[in-house]
Image (cartoon, rainbow, N blue to C red):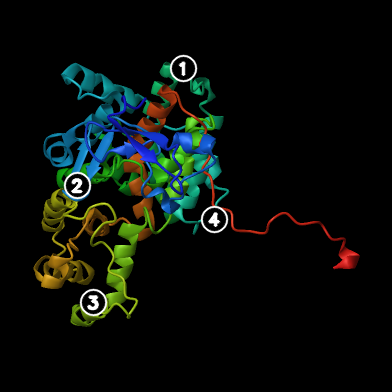
Amino acid sequence: MPPKPTKYAHLSIDGEADAIDLPIYQGSEGTPVIDVAKLGANGYFTYDPGFVSTASCDSDITYIDGDQGILLHRGYPIEELAEGSNYLELCYLLLNGELPNQAQNDEFVRIIKKHTMVHEQLAFFFRGFRRDAHPMAIMCGVVGALSAFYHDSLDIENPEHRRITAHRLIAKIPTIAAMCYKYSQGQPFIYPRNDLDYAANFLHMMFATPCENYEVSPTLARAMDRIFLLHADHEQNASTSTVRLAGSTGANPFACIAAGIAALWGPAHGGANEAVLTMLRDIGDEKHIGEFVKKFKDKDSGVRLMGFGHRVYKNYDPRAKVMQQTCKEVLEELGVENDPLLRLAQKLEKIALEDDYFVQRKLYPNVDFYSGIILKAIGIPVEMFTVIFATGRTPGWISQWNEMISQSYKIGRPRQLYQGHSQRRYVPMDKR
């Protein structure tokens, strides 16, 4: 529930003497919000396409200050979490509100590992998809189907059921993601290995085969862990809002997460790191980079620069600072300095950090730019990028869903500004 009002806004319409008093709330951080719920009873609604000025909920999980380049999870700066923590510890924090002690962390890791396998019949689902189906299409379908296999914990009003479902989703999504990749390659599925940590297990399921083991590089495992960690939650973005909206109907959590995956698939949201690689391929060669930058600076050219700047962050994306260093570690580990696409990306990064046009407009490389390069270097195909984003975002989605269900919530029902025909009479077909 929101805090007590700090003050009130008084809305007077056409100078009417009786103003509508609207409470103003101030959260622990961020911009004050005006509660407009009373407007409906007074015959008015607000108009805010894209909900860019609307707080749809109150939350304790994640805070973003885009102007200052700040991202906090439960109050902890993302840079400190990325430096000292790991993905599963962050999952615990998002779910429970506090960082675990050693015993709590060990128990949480044990529980997640216990749930890494998926029901064997799920493997048959994959055979219904074409081999060239997009992995996100497969992931949407398979995750949505989980409720048919794990219906022993679907009472959303039961906190224990919600806890079990959260653990299952965090544990099983990487297994499903790797299965999506293996299916597209025509290779056998690789079962989880619970002697490996979370990120290393994912890479093993991706790249091992029954006839040849895959030794997971600690550097690559750490990079993958950071990619998951840096994407774990990002406040009320499109996919998270979709999860909450679906959840407000009382839908089961597996269906809600599948809805979030569908929303994330959009190129304006989760497809941004995929778009970075597409852009680099379109540039083609380092000798064309000057021409590309010139076209980008020309507003009439229609050329878009992907992976730079951010809708929320008007300063350097705090996640990108961490990912930049990780990117350097991965490229050094793999020795891929001669990859023309990666050389092109590094040159474009250098221009963006030094060119006054980019610096003045704060068009810094964002997390999508660096994560795309890292995933490409590891050998993960572009069509899997958004699947990996969805894997990392799962604890954020389930934490946001759980928070909403734990509160007194209403079914989502946005209003509209109707501009169609006024009421008119039906005309029989022979009279038209």
Tag in front: 4 or 2: 2
N-terminal of the pair, mark 2 or mark 3, is 2
Cα distance between the residues tagged 4 and 2 = 31 Å
Q: Which residue is mark 1?
A: 158
Tag in front: 4 or 3: 3
Can you tell which quarter of the image residue 29 is in?
Answer: top left
Q: Which residue is mark 3?
A: 297
Cα distance between the residues tagged 1 and 4 = 38 Å
Q: Residues within 10 Å of mark 4 (few under 14, many from 20)?
A: few
Tag in front: 3 or 1: 3
SS at badge 4: loop
> Which residue occupies 21% across, 43% down?
226
Tag in front: 2 or 1: 1
For the C terminus, which image quadrant? bottom right
Tag in front: 2 or 3: 3
N-terminal of the pair, mark 2 or mark 1, is 1
Q: Which residue is mark 2?
A: 223
SS at badge 3: helix
Q: Position of residue 382 (x, y in %)?
A: 35, 59
Can you see residue 171? no
Q: Are marks 1 and 4 in contact (CB under 8 Å)?
A: no
> Which residue occupies 50% across, 32% down?
248
Can you tell which quarter of the image residue 304 is in?
Answer: bottom left
